[in-house]
Image: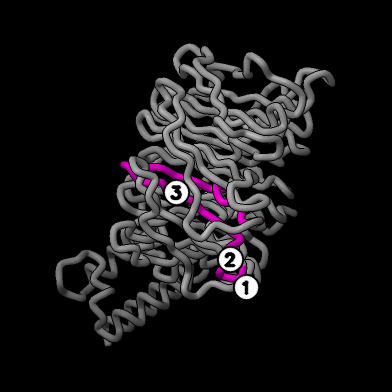
Amino acid sequence: MQLKRTLSAITACLCISTALSQVINEDVRLANQSGSNNDYFGHSISISGSRVVVGAYYDYYNRDDIGMGAAFLFDSQSGEMLEYLRPNDGRVNDLFGWSVILKKDILVVGAMGHDLGGAVYIFDANSGTQLRKIIPDDIRPGDRFGYSVDLDGRLLAVGSPDSNPNGQDSGSVYLFDIATGNQLQKITPNDAYRLEHFGRAIAVDDGVLAVGKVSDESLFEYGSAYLFDTSTGAQLARIFSNEGFRGNEFGYSIALDNGILAVGARHDNNLEPNVGSAYLYDIHSTKQIAKLFPLDGQEDDQFGYSIAIHNNTVVVGARWEDGYRPSFSSGNSGSAYTFNATTGAHIAKFHVLEDEVHDYFGTSVSIDNDTIAVGASYEDTFTGAAYIFNGPYQRCEADFSNDYFNDVIDISIFWALMFNHNIEADFNEDGVLDFFDISAFLTSYTTGCP
């Protein structure tokens, strides 16, 4: 009875307070200070160590080079721009910067519009010097080679989703030795078919190539993900969602790290139409680890539009999410979410402090250890911006309802757990349910989320 009265008193005191948010705002904002409308700065992003590269595929000086594009290298801690990168042979509508990847001292930029077929450029991240231009042996106009890029050691993977090895726009992925520029493999799936755009989303890690395919003819457009051995080019597995539906675009985004595959399905109807979802798989067994979704998801959020994974943390972009400032109009401002890659548990939600309508924050995401980078390519009339969040980020322990806020719902859940002697209420983890758990919960609740 005393415990019940104590909990009731806590509830009465805390119910009148404002909910404590688990939403995290940016530490650094990145922008092209001389940018103009329609640059789409932030369409692509990649972070490695203390540096981050941001693609702006429509950046231009004047009307003579509209759509040439550019890539910007920044110090991720200070926001200082280190390099402004353009190709030595850049031309109108190259779309240089559509895709980027930065790994240590090597920076790769895709220009899927170059010479109508596409190209990829390699730079020294320390000096900004262009080292090499790469095109495949059989490139043709319309292939969109360079639509996606990823890097693992000396191995470079490049997606060409509109190439025609197995019919119109069936798609392919090329593997290159980045040190020599030599083409090593051309990858296509065993069940390739026309109009599947294989190679739109790719990831490579530790000898395994993962490829997303959102339009899968044999699965009636359910989408799927493929795994390949990068040494032999052999297909290892084909993965698809057992609970998917036609048009969910499973495979729209893809990421791979330390044996865990993350796959975005931006049009999944998990909670409401097109709210989106993401899936985690063990690549060795191909078994599903978890399904990820935003607990505050709404129609057309497109959760899963972008995805990244590193060191057991998954970042998922929802670029049409409607923001968190109820007194402001922030429709489609966008957001990003983090999850534990082993358990699928929610960790945190990320927003721009001054979000606006149609920023599309979450168009691109990247993570390196505890630092997260997110692109907002439509901010300021499509000029674009990017944001850095410095971790580490921990799950908010008092948020029992997983709704990204500490509020009366969490108090009610904790009260019910304590009243029913449920061990989940053992907040101080001493194996006993007592006043010390109430005190620990109250401290966590009032302190707020990390």
Residue with the mark numbered 1: 272
The reply to whether callout 1 and callout 2 are in contact (CB within 8 Å) is yes
The one of 363 and 431 positioned closer to us in this rendering: 363
The residue that appears at 38% across and 59% down in the rendered structure is 237
The one of 429 and 394 positioned closer to us in this rendering: 394
Tell me the SS state at disc 2. Answer: loop
* Residue 299 x, y percent position in the rendering: 66, 67
Between the residue at mark 1 and the residue at mark 2, the CA separation in whole angstroms equals 8 Å
Residue 1 seen by the camera: yes
Q: Is residue 284 magenta?
A: no
* Residue 374 x, y percent position in the rendering: 55, 41
The amino acid type, in three-letter code, at marker 2 is Gly
The one of 334 and 428 positioned closer to us in this rendering: 334
Residue with the mark numbered 3: 255
Tell me the SS state at disc 1. Answer: loop
The amino acid type, in three-letter code, at marker 3 is Ala
Q: Splitting the image into 4 quarters, where does residue 62 fall? A: top right
User: Compared with residue 231, is residue 17 higher up or lower down, i.e. above or below?
Assistant: below
User: Compared with residue 387, is residue 400 higher up or lower down, i.e. above or below?
Assistant: below
The total number of labels drawn is: 3
233 with respect to 109 (left or right): left
> Which tag, 3 or 2, sits closer to the chain's start?
3
> Which tag, 1 or 2, sits closer to the chain's start?
1
Between the residue at mark 1 and the residue at mark 3, the CA separation in whole angstroms equals 25 Å
Tell me the SS state at disc 3. Answer: strand
Between the residue at mark 3 and the residue at mark 2, the CA separation in whole angstroms equals 22 Å
Residues drawn in magenta: 195-220
The reply to whether callout 3 and callout 2 are in contact (CB within 8 Å) is no
Q: Splitting the image into 4 quarters, where does residue 35 fall? A: top right
Residue with the mark numbered 2: 297
